Image (tube, rainbow, N blue to C red):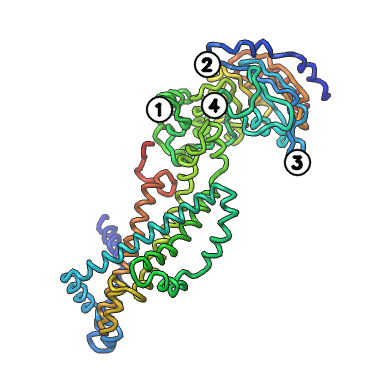
């Protein structure tokens, strides 16, 4: 079972790397993990992880808690360094934090002492006020720009965090169970919003979740992580926008559940 | 229907004052009738007269100003050093390893116990008093700044890093504001210690200031002036506390505990 995805490793992203002078810099970039390993002392979190994500794909990574999903995200964004192997974004290895890859955390992580607008524009890029307001408009919170984060609901805070990510025009968006703490209704709302934004901005998206239904509802492709590696890989062939989970998707969902 | 509620509101407002006012009246009657000796405790009216006379002659303002000056100078020096050390040890593990245990040792020495040394070093001039106040205010501010920085949510710092903030920006925009509630608690402690230290320092060795004024009055058995001095200290302490509260309301406007009408812009 562990061999199932190994044949994907043979392909090369050399063509992508050659196109370094791409005009639309913030459009989605491809992500490639090559023999990625990570250990904390004797504990091996990731072992020989191989995965290739084409540009602009929406990929969901499903797995039980503790299989190293969040550690993988930290490697992808450049917060931690792998023990072995490498992460390639558009063919270029990730060695430090980079602007084109943005991570949305499980908790919103807003600065309580800055207003919503200042939180969105935390990177203080040129014209951050206008850009931040634009991003807040994208997530439907422009009227809360001068509020303190403390007065927002959980869903609103996550939307501010989403705006903070959008304002930096990521090529690769990493989502680390961003909707895990939200109630079902708010979560469905966020799914719709995320799908809309993904269709509009065309970033490559990697969503980590333990919720298979969420993965199937949002992603083009779902991979299952177990024991620090990818053990199952399946495409989700369904038209967008996905408003309902039909029988075919439900069957797929059941199949993935068995693999988790 | 508004009448009873208004009168109950008024009585709510007056109730806390009943006991102090009754005590004051009892005190006045006791002092006047000779039940309480003037030498033990002067009548409130005599204290009021002493206040009026000292205020008129300008002596009170002179002493208060000098004491205030010493207090602020000591707080600035001690608080400044405490804050700087707190930041340094909070940010750098190496500095913490080098300095923290030494500081904890010093902290546990009652700072008033070093008065004999201080007099030997600085004599009885201004430096001695400012030094004592500085030592007294250093530790509460150090401890609370250090603690405030240590307890900042690591997730926020990580988020700032992912968003491309450099170490300096992280310090100014994440670490410092995050530590501020704790720093201000330290400031409030420090203000209490500041007045306490100053009283002791001024009563032991001074030729001006409120402490000197009360000690001088004691020599001449002017108990009314002594009580006046104590009252002035109480008022100054209260004023310092009110000032910190105002600062808290401004600086911590973002904090849910202070949410009012304030919606500051960045």
Residue A76 locus on image (x, y percent):
64, 27
User: Circle 2 marks a residue in which chain?
Assistant: A
Which image quadrant: the N terminus of chain A? Answer: top right
- Disc 4 crowd, CA 10 A, few/some/many (<14, 14-19, 20+): few
The answer to whether marks 4 and 1 sit on the same chain is yes
- Disc 2 crowd, CA 10 A, few/some/many (<14, 14-19, 20+): few
Residue nearest the observer in this picture, A10 or B33: A10
Residue nearest the observer in this picture, B1 or A169: A169
- Which numbered dot is residue A41? 3
Secondary structure under the numbered disc 1 in the rendered image: helix
Marks 4/1 in contact by CB < 8 Å: the verdict is no
Task: Say which residue label 2 marks.
Answer: A200
Question: What's the distance in space between the residues labelled 4 and 3, CA to CA?
Answer: 41 Å
Marks 4/3 in contact by CB < 8 Å: the verdict is no
Q: Which tag, 1 or 2, sits closer to the chain's start?
A: 1
- Disc 3 crowd, CA 10 A, few/some/many (<14, 14-19, 20+): few
Of the two numbered discs 3 and 1 in the rendering, the one whose residue sits closer to the viewer: 3
Secondary structure under the numbered disc 2 in the rendered image: helix
Of the two numbered discs 4 and 3 in the rendering, the one whose residue sits closer to the viewer: 3
User: Circle 4 marks a residue in which chain?
Assistant: A
Task: Say which residue label 4 marks.
Answer: A189
Q: Which tag, 4 or 2, sits closer to the chain's start?
A: 4
């Amino acid at each position: 079972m562990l061999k199932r995805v190994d044949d994907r490793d043979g392909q090369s992203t050399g063509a992508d790397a050659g196109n370094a002078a791409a005009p639309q810099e913030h459009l989605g970039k491809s992500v490639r993990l090559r023999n990625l390993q990570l250990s904390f002392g004797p504990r091996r979190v990731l072992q020989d992880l191989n995965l290739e994500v084409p540009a602009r794909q929406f990929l969901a990574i499903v797995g039980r808690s503790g299989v190293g999903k969040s550690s993988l995200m930290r490697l992808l964004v450049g917060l931690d360094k792998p023990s072995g192997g490498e992460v390639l974004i558009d063919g270029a290895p990730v060695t430090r934090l980079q602007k084109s890859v943005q991570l949305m955390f499980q908790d919103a992580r807003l600065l309580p002492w800055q207003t919503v607008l200042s939180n969105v524009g935390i990177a203080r890029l040129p014209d951050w006020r206008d850009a931040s307001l634009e991003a807040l408009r994208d997530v439907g919170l422009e009227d809360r720009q001068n509020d303190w984060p403390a007065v927002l609901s959980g869903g609103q805070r996550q939307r501010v965090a989403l705006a903070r990510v959008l304002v930096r025009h990521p090529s690769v968006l990493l989502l680390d169970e961003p909707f895990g703490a939200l109630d079902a209704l708010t979560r469905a709302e966020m799914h719709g919003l995320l799908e809309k934004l993904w269709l509009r901005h065309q970033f490559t998206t990697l969503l980590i979740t333990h919720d298979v239904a969420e993965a199937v509802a949002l992603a083009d492709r779902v991979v299952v992580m177990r024991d620090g590696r990818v053990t199952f890989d399946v495409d989700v062939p369904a038209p967008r926008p996905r408003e309902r989970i039909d029988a075919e998707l439900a069957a797929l969902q059941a199949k993935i559940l068995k693999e988790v | 229907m508004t009448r009873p509620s208004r009168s109950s509101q008024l009585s709510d407002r007056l109730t806390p004052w009943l006991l102090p006012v009754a005590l004051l009246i009892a005190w006045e009657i006791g002092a006047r009738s000779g039940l309480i000796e003037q030498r033990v405790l002067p009548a409130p009216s005599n204290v009021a007269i002493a206040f009026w006379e000292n205020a008129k002659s300008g002596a009170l303002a002179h002493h208060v100003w000098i004491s205030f000056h010493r207090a602020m100078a000591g707080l600035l020096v001690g608080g400044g050093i405490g804050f700087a050390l707190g930041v340094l040890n909070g940010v750098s593990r190496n500095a913490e390893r080098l300095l923290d245990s030494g500081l904890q040792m010093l902290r546990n020495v009652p700072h008033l116990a070093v008065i004999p040394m201080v007099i030997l070093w600085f004599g009885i001039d201004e430096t001695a008093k400012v030094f004592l106040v500085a030592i007294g205010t250093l530790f509460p501010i150090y401890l609370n700044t250090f603690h405030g920085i240590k307890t900042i949510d690591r997730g926020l710092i990580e988020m700032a890093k992912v968003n491309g903030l450099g170490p300096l920006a992280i310090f100014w925009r994440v670490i410092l504001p995050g530590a501020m509630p704790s720093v201000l608690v330290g400031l409030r402690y420090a203000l209490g210690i500041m007045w306490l230290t100053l009283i002791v320092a001024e009563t032991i060795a001074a030729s001006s200031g409120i402490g000197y004024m009360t000690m001088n009055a004691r020599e001449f058995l002017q108990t009314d002036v002594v009580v006046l001095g104590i009252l002035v200290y109480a008022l100054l302490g209260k004023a310092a506390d009110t000032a910190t509260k105002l600062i808290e309301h401004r600086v911590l406007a973002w904090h849910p505990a202070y949410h009012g009408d304030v919606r500051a812009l960045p």
